[in-house]
Amino acid sequence: MLLNLSLKNFVIVDELNLSFEDGFTVLTGETGAGKSIILDAIGLLLGDKADFSQIRNGQTEAKLSALFAIENLPNVQNILIEQGFSEELCTEIAISRTISANGRSRNFINGQAATLSQLKHIGEMLIDIHGQHAHYSLMNENEQRHILDAFSGSLKTAESVKQAYQHYQNAVVALQDAQNNAEELAERQERFAWQYKELSELAPKNGEWQDLSAQYDQLAHAADIQTSAENAYQLIDGDSGINRLLNRTVRTLQDLAEIEPQFAESLNILASVEAEIGEVSSILRAVSNKSELDPQELTACEERMQALSHAAKKYRCDEALLPEKLAEIEEKLHHLTASVDMEHLKQQVDKYLQEYQRVAKELTQQRKDGAEQLSNEVEKLLHSLAMQKAKFQAALTPNEEPTPNGNEKIAYLIDTTMSDHLRPLAKTASGGELARISLAVQVAAGRAATVPTLIFDEVDSGIGGRVADIVGQCLQNLSQNYQVLAITHLAQVAAHANQHWQVSKTDKNGKIISHIRHLTDDERIEETARMIGGEKITSSTRQNAAEMLAAAREKSFQAA
């Protein structure tokens, strides 16, 4: 639930800190006082796009933050851990945004930078907002379908249907393309098959070109290598070589080594030099013995390199990349073979159609169950909202062809004239009736909400009197299971709230500033009297307000 909301330099708010409680809270005030600012701020914190004109005039940035209790929301707790916003299960989440006049917006979850999509994803699990113009969107089939799916708990199934439909459509398009371009695809397949055969017969291997280049260099210079090795060997072990000079040097020093210590040290060094020169001599002898010119081996190496070079030029790649080119052609050939395999493509269409029908059938059943329950609940609410004879139905009409939204169209039908003929909302309901129908749908949908906090923004517009009192009771009943926040102009609705916030505005040095404060019991009477009688409040108006509040408390007590 929402625990705290803080705003600074937002629209006409200088600085504001609100602490919320559970139950039913109302915000009231004169038109233009700033009631909608609260909803705008919450929307921004839950991922709405920032409007930089919302920064208070004369300021460089606006700051918004909210604190939510999430001890009963394990999904949110797990998401915070998965996305790195918390190291362990936590009971609260802090969301904040800073909107700057330079066009930048910074978002934070538990003090760590977050994206708008992350705010929106988490926000959808924290708060559900029912706007004052919901009865207009209720005319839209997409909105009607979304409400039913949310009520039925089938939003995930509906998403699976969309994915299955997309897979089915992709398979249909692939089959149609193959049928329309069969000749072209066959030509391409033949070309790639020939290229694959040619390169497969050449059989280039990874690292082969580098090995061939090294081998060719060695074979082509075999005579030079052998001559150089033999000459160097003679310089070391020949009649006038280094080894003979070393032996003479050693003999010269040995006779006096016991007398002169430095001679002994020199002999040790010469022994080491002699050993290393001997190792060099062995290497040179080995090189000389193996570096024999083999014309056939050299010819074979040259022919293989020429074949690889010719293929590389033909396929426009480096010789070393020929194995990758072969793999690329093989992959293209495999794809084209599948593309022209009509039987396989038809099987794919059938496969994905069956999968679509499976999940669509599951969605249809969920919608049928939910539609029956939603229809009954909305109808009961309409009867309590002074539409005693109204009949309501969330109707499912089968589609002739698969659609991304399932096997049926969703339409909300109503009969308010006892004609026993249900018709679409737009063709039947008047403006006032539509407002009540919308409210009934939203209250019914709210009863199935999976979020802890429900906000109603003047959804009671267009009604009044006894019906408004019933609306207040409905919202109060909802607050037994949810935290409910409502913005209203109706005293009958406000009277049923557990907490009452008043929004007002003042002129401070030529600037309009909005204020919100929690009302005491006496102040609630005064605000309720203002809502009943307008600017001129009389003693009888106050008495009427006090009686209205007392009656609402009594109804809440009886309901509890």
Image (cartoon, rainbow, N blue to C red):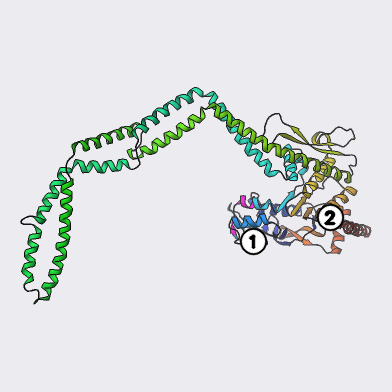
- Looking at the image, the residue that sits furthest to the right is 540
Q: Amino acid at mark 2?
A: Ala
Image coords of residue 93 (percent x, y): 66, 60
Q: Secondary structure at mark 2?
A: helix
- Rendered image: mark on residue 494: 2
Category of crowding for the residue at label 1, using alpha-carbon neighbours closer than 10 angstroms: few (below 14), some (14–19), many (at least 20): some
| Residue 295 placement, left or right of 250 | right
The image shows residue 120, relative to residue 502, as above or below, that is above
| Residue 140 placement, left or right of 291 | right
Start-end of magenta stretch: 112-120
The quadrant of the rendering that contains the C terminus is bottom right
Is mark 2 in CB contact (under 8 Å) with mark 1? no
Q: Nearer the viewer, residue 49 or 51?
A: 49
| Residue 86 placement, left or right of 19 | left
Q: Nearer the viewer, residue 204 or 324?
A: 204
Q: Secondary structure at mark 1?
A: loop
Residue 538 within the magenta-colored segment of the rendering? no
Category of crowding for the residue at label 2, using alpha-carbon neighbours closer than 10 angstroms: few (below 14), some (14–19), many (at least 20): many
Image coords of residue 274 (percent x, y): 14, 62
Image coords of residue 218 (percent x, y): 21, 44
Residue at screen point 15% across, 67% down: 269
- Residue 56 visible, this orientation: no
* Residue bearing mark 1: 89
